[in-house]
Amino acid sequence: MSEKMAHTNSSLHVEISSLKLENPTMLAAGVLGVSGLAMNRVANAGAGAIITKSMGLEPRRGFPNPVVAQVQGGILNAMGLPNPGIRQLAEEIQKIERKTVPIIVSIYASTPEDFAAVACEAVKSGAAGVELNVSCPHAETGGAEIGQNPDLVEQVVKATVRNVNKPVFVKLTPEVTNISEVAKAAENAGAEAITAINTVKAMVIDVETAQPILGNKIGGLSGPAIKPIAVRCVYEIYEAVRIPIIGCGGIVTWKDAVEMMEAGASAIQVGTAIAIEGLGVFKRIAQGIQAFMEKKGFDGVKEIVGLSHKE
């Protein structure tokens, strides 16, 4: 490897708490994060880290079909958090060939005690960290009803942090009056990073039948349509907390990623863009960030983070 190539690679390196990422792109929860085979494909495609699909203590079937609808500017989904249960994950994680790619397990529950229990199982399975899903807009229990209450978020984070020795991230909902207040509560409770944002509660109706298209009627909107909301949330959170922020929501191109980082994100997550651009999106975004840094004379990703807050 030439010195130039080594410099190029190292300039993209990112540290989120104790986790070391080869580049600032991460697979978002809910996309290809269930089977070891799928996660292995994501790792080999160039993702800097992988967030699994949200896992609970017990297996869950999810909502009846249809669970996904394509809409202008994105995708609407109401999967209902289907998963095989946290205890089935260890075998899948062992199938990941690229051991340098951190596997962060997304978890959900309805009480602080259950969050802690799922987190313990996630760490046993080989998770490098856990991401607390307190923000799903269509969960039957838990989800956004927790994430909209700073006190509940604090309780969930404290219970989890007390019981695991791995980094704890908290994924927030944008559907609050003051997202900075919730982020601060998570930080005060011991969270080591904030992920912002989850999908936005939304709905679509078939005009011919006058009926909601999704089986659950209401779902979560992801994709380019929500990027400005995500950028705003990251910007506000950056001014409220000292821990790293992971930007998520509508990132498709390297420009989207850089915009999110300038707002305050240390890394970014990619989800819906995989359906639009394919798995090559990870490398394209990383290469675009690299080219941008070279053009601007930046030596590393840290120099981009929070730039929009500087005069």
Image: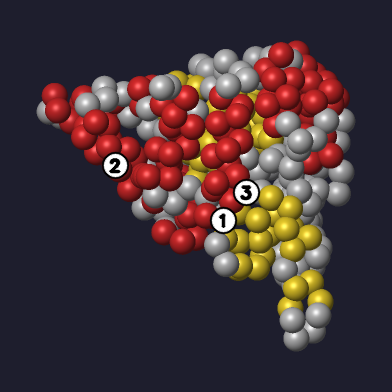
Q: Which residue is mark 3?
A: 30
Q: Determine the CA span between mark 1 and mark 3.
A: 18 Å
- 28 sits left or right of 56 in the view: left
Q: Quadrant of residue 175?
A: top right
Q: Which residue is mark 1?
A: 225
Q: Which mark is residue 287?
A: 2
Pick the quarter of the image with the N terminus: top left
Residue 163 placed where, x, y %?
Answer: 75, 16
State if disc 2 and disc 1 touch (CB < 8 Å). no
Residue 216 placed where, x, y %?
Answer: 81, 63
The amino acid marked with disc number 3 is Gly
Any part of residue 173 in sight = yes
Q: Earlier in the sequence, mark 2 or mark 3?
A: 3
Q: Determine the CA span between mark 1 and mark 2.
A: 24 Å
Instruction: Name above or below for residue 25 compared with residue 8.
Output: below
Pick the quarter of the image with the C terminus: top left
Q: Earlier in the sequence, mark 1 or mark 2?
A: 1
Name the foreground residue: 244 vs 241.
241
- Residue at image position (70%, 31%) is 179
Q: Tell me how the rendering is colored.
A: secondary structure
- Residue at image position (57%, 33%) is 234
Residue 233 placed where, x, y %?
Answer: 61, 36
The amino acid marked with disc number 2 is Gln
